[in-house]
Amino acid sequence: ERERERRKYLIYVVWLFFVTLAWNWNAWLIPVRCTFPYQTPENIHWWLLMDYFCDGIYILDIFVMQPRLQFVRGGDVVVSKKNTPTLTSSYFHTHILNTHTYSVLLLQYNAFFEFNDRLEAVMSKAYIYRVIRTSAYLLYSLHCNACIFYWGSDYEGLGSTKWSRSVSQCYIRCYYFAVKTLITIGGLPDPTTVFEIVFQMLNYFVGVFAFSIMIGQVGAYYRHCVDSTVKYMSSYKIPREVQNRVKIWYDYTWKSQGMLDEQELLIQLPDKMRLDIAADVNYSIVSKVALFQGCDRQMIFDMLKRLKSVVYLPGDFVCKKGEIGRDMYIIKAGEVQVVGGPDGMTVFVTLRAGSVFGEISLLAGGGGNRRTANVKAHGFANLFILDKKDLAEILVHYPESQKLLRKKAKKILTKDKKPADEKGQAKETGEVIPQRPETPKLYKAALEVGTGQTFAKLKETYKGATLEVFTSPVL
């Protein structure tokens, strides 16, 4: 059913494309036909043929396509043709009026804007189309400016002034003149008549304000954030090196993401829409984490909404050895390195996009286990972070998943500690009957001296006793 609705939607977008082409034909060429002498009795039948062709597209749109559209009434999606706009509705009358007066006025513009909205909805990179559309707006404003300039020059008399001396040739000269005036390039002859002076002033004002608004709106939020941060750092005399790193972070984050904080954009959406976006973006990554495999699917969806995106600059430490671990990290883009050694520069392993580290910290007791190594960004790294507090709030509603996670965490911790325990046990067994330490030399010398004297006394006593036995008289 969804696939069928999607095909219908794409068919309608294609139809709107043809309606938009017809609208652009009239929007661009009506000013030319009204000002330049390009429509003549010899070629008017070709112009009328294109007009009738465009009107035919509008009539098909009114009588065939529009009555088949679904619309919302009172919050309900209406699909019945009986409830669609009829021949007596104001909607129908407006479109009929647009069709009859289109050769004079630039109407039917609603189809153009509807096409823009619907096309952006189906494009994966809508910003590309917005750039093209903005450029088209600029070209169209220059087009209208060229037509007005020719009309004014023709009204005052072609060739009567320096301004109108070269515009009698063709449309391209007027367009070039419009580019130089509206974009304020300069290098034009001084205006002499009232019309030329007013026209030049309006062009300068419109050109300056239009371009400042177009360019300023794109980065207004970004510049405001940067200026506020710089002002804050300057007031507290933050070191220049830190300020430069902050500016680099702003610049990279804005260029890579087009935003500074994804949560600011998603927080205004309903939970269901936020969940859909988070699932499409992050589910494929989180589902590969061994710790969360086998958990409740809805628990993982709730966890996806709590993930926070953080950008680290080259050389920034994600976590340091000895810190209390309270977060789990998922690498969205870039690389991080696990470093250590005597100088702290030895690279043990490099983790790339899709890798996960710090997941045991989420379930370790006692305020979180301590980090066993330093992890720093190798280049610009974009990481997803899941806070321990957020996971605890989620697990309250999923006791079975909580038991499974604790069991897995305990198993992983036991596995990590087993080699260290075996090493300690072997050392402890070997020292149950310790080897006899070597006798100190000073103590050995004293012992030899004392032992020699004792044996000498015993020897003399033994000899005396023997003599007494052999010299005693015989009874």
Image (cartoon, helix red, strand yellow):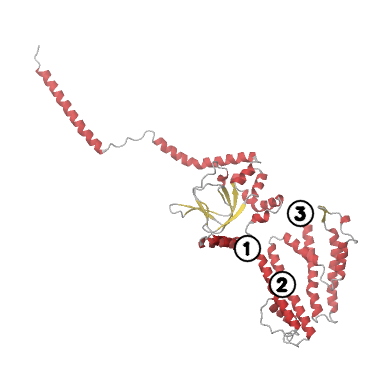
- Which residue is at the front of the view, 82 or 148? 148
Q: Position of residue 149 (x, y in %)?
A: 75, 80
Residue 164, quarter of picture: bottom right
User: Label 3: few (<14), some or many (≥20) within 10 Å?
Assistant: few
Q: Which mark is residue 255?
A: none
Q: Residue at x 84, y 81 (%)?
A: 40
Check disc 3 and give the amino acid type: Glu
Q: Is residue 293 left or right of residue 129?
A: left
Q: Which mark is residue 138?
A: 2
Q: Residue at x 60, y 41 (%)?
A: 405
Which callout, 3 or 1, points at the residue further toward the start of the chain? 3
Q: Position of residue 433 (x, y in %)?
A: 37, 33
Q: Which mark is residue 224?
A: 1
Quarter of the picture holding the C terminus = top left
Q: Is residue 123 left or right of residue 97?
A: left
As drawn, which residue projects farthest toward the right?
A: 88
Q: CA distance from mark 3 to mark 1?
A: 43 Å
As helix, strand or loop, the secondary structure at mark 3 comes to helix
Q: CA distance from mark 1 to mark 2?
A: 26 Å
User: Label 1: few (<14), some or many (≥20) within 10 Å?
Assistant: few
- Which residue is at the front of the view, 171 or 146? 146
As drawn, which residue projects farthest toward the bottom?
A: 160
Which callout, 1 or 2, points at the residue further toward the start of the chain? 2
Foreground disc of the pair 3, 1: 1
Residue 191, quarter of picture: bottom right
Foreground disc of the pair 2, 3: 2
Q: CA distance from mark 2 to mark 3?
A: 38 Å
Q: Residue at x 36, y 35 (%)?
A: 434
Residue 430 makes an appearance in the image: yes
Q: How many marks?
A: 3
Check disc 2 and give the amino acid type: Leu
Q: Which mark is residue 3?
A: 3
